[in-house]
Amino acid sequence: MMNEILGFAAGSLVAISVFPQVYKSWKTKSTRDIAISWSLINLAGQVLWVVYGFLISSYSLVIMSGVTLLMNVSMIVLKLRYG
């Protein structure tokens, strides 16, 4: 139980850390300073964390990595749109 609470806390911080950049990019319609390579590497890492979370049956890891994954997809969409 304590592991899952810690997982949700850590995952929340990671997901929240991506949000300001997504919001700024959406608001300014500029992603010039965002490297697409960073976004794609981060996306791949989040996919692997979700898979790993399923394999070890960790709800916190699956959910929070899924949220971060969605944030990264949003960043990639914004990068492709406003590049």
Image (spheres, grey):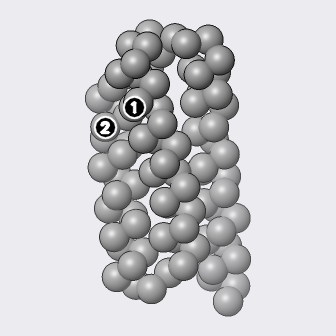
User: In percent of the image, x 45 and y 51: which residue is there?
Assistant: 69
Q: Is residue 12 left or right of residue 22?
A: right
Residue sitting farthest toward the bottom = 1
Amino acid type at image mark 1: Ile
User: In percent of the image, x 29 and y 29: which residue is there?
Assistant: 37
Q: Can residue 61 be spotted in the picture?
A: yes
14, 74: nearer the viewer? 74
Q: Residues within 10 Å of mark 1 (few under 14, many from 20)?
A: many
Kind of element beneath mark 1: helix
Q: Residues within 10 Å of mark 2 (few under 14, many from 20)?
A: some
Q: Can residue 33 be spotted in the picture?
A: no
Amino acid type at image mark 2: Leu
Residue under numbered circle 2 = 40
Q: Reading the chain from its start, which is encountered first: label 2 or label 1? A: 2
Quarter of the image with the C terminus is top left
Quarter of the image with the N terminus is bottom right
Residue under numbered circle 1 = 76
Mark in front: 2 vs 1:
1
Query: Residue 49 location in percent, x, y?
Result: 39, 64
Q: Is residue 78 left or right of residue 52?
A: right
Tell me how many marks there are. Answer: 2
The answer to whether marks 2 and 1 mark residues whose Cβ atoms lie closer than 8 Å is: yes
Query: Residue 71 location in percent, x, y?
Result: 52, 43
Label of residue 25 in the image: none
Kind of element beneath mark 2: helix
Snapshot quadrant of residue 12: bottom right
Q: Is residue 3 above or below residue 7?
A: below
Q: Is residue 23 above or below residue 58?
A: above
Q: Is residue 63 above or below residue 40?
A: below
Query: Residue 81 location in percent, x, y?
Result: 40, 18
